[in-house]
Image (cartoon, helix red, strand yellow):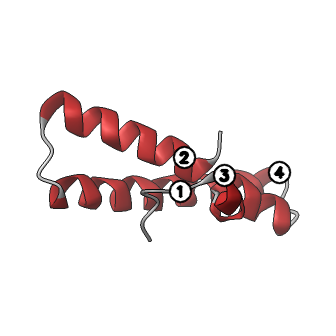
């Protein structure tokens, strides 16, 4: 699952959009969002490694990638 290069037209792929689509609430929503953010973090970390990013560039890339994936 790679979130890099997401455009606003694909916003349905975000964690928040998926949760809304599934009509999740309460504990189910919290659990889903934690897992989705964790998965996004792993995918974004792998993507940063493939790009051979390090230090501040890796941190910045990963943060933006995860934010885009979660859909904040």
Q: Position of residue 44 (x, y in %)?
A: 35, 55
The residue lying at 46 percent from left, 46 percent from top is 66
Marks 1/4 in contact by CB < 8 Å: the verdict is no
Q: Give the label, 3 or 4, closer to the camera.
A: 3
Q: Earlier in the sequence, mark 3 or mark 4?
A: 3
Label placed on residue 6: 1
Marks 2/4 in contact by CB < 8 Å: the verdict is no
Q: Earlier in the sequence, mark 2 or mark 4?
A: 4
Q: Is residue 28 visible?
A: no
How far is the residue under mark 2 from the one under mark 4?
23 Å
Q: Secondary structure at mark 1?
A: loop
Q: Which residue is mark 2?
A: 68
How far is the residue under mark 1 from the one under mark 4?
28 Å
The residue lying at 85 percent from left, 54 percent from top is 25
How far is the residue under mark 3 from the one under mark 4?
27 Å
Answer with left or right where residue 33 lies relative to residue 5: right
How far is the residue under mark 3 from the one under mark 1?
7 Å
The residue lying at 65 percent from left, 57 percent from top is 15
How far is the residue under mark 3 from the one under mark 2?
10 Å
Which quarter of the picture shows residue 40?
A: bottom left
Label placed on residue 8: 3
Q: Position of residue 32 (x, y in %)?
A: 65, 60
Marks 2/1 in contact by CB < 8 Å: the verdict is yes
Q: Which residue is mark 4?
A: 26
Q: Callout 1: few (<14), some (14-19), or many (20+) C-alpha neighbours within 10 Å?
A: some
Q: Give the label, 1 or 4, closer to the camera.
A: 1
Q: Split into 4 quadrants, where in the image is the C terminus?
A: top right
Q: Position of residue 33 (x, y in %)?
A: 63, 53
Q: Split into 4 quadrants, where in the image is the N terminus?
A: bottom left
């Amino acid at each position: 699952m790679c979130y890099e290069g997401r455009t606003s037209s694909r916003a349905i792929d975000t964690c928040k959009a998926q949760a809304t689509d599934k009509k999740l609430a309460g504990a189910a929503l919290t659990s889903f969002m934690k897992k989705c953010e964790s998965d996004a973090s792993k995918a974004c970390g792998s993507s940063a490694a493939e790009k051979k990013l390090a230090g501040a560039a890796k941190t910045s890339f990963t943060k933006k990638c995860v934010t885009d994936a979660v859909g904040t």
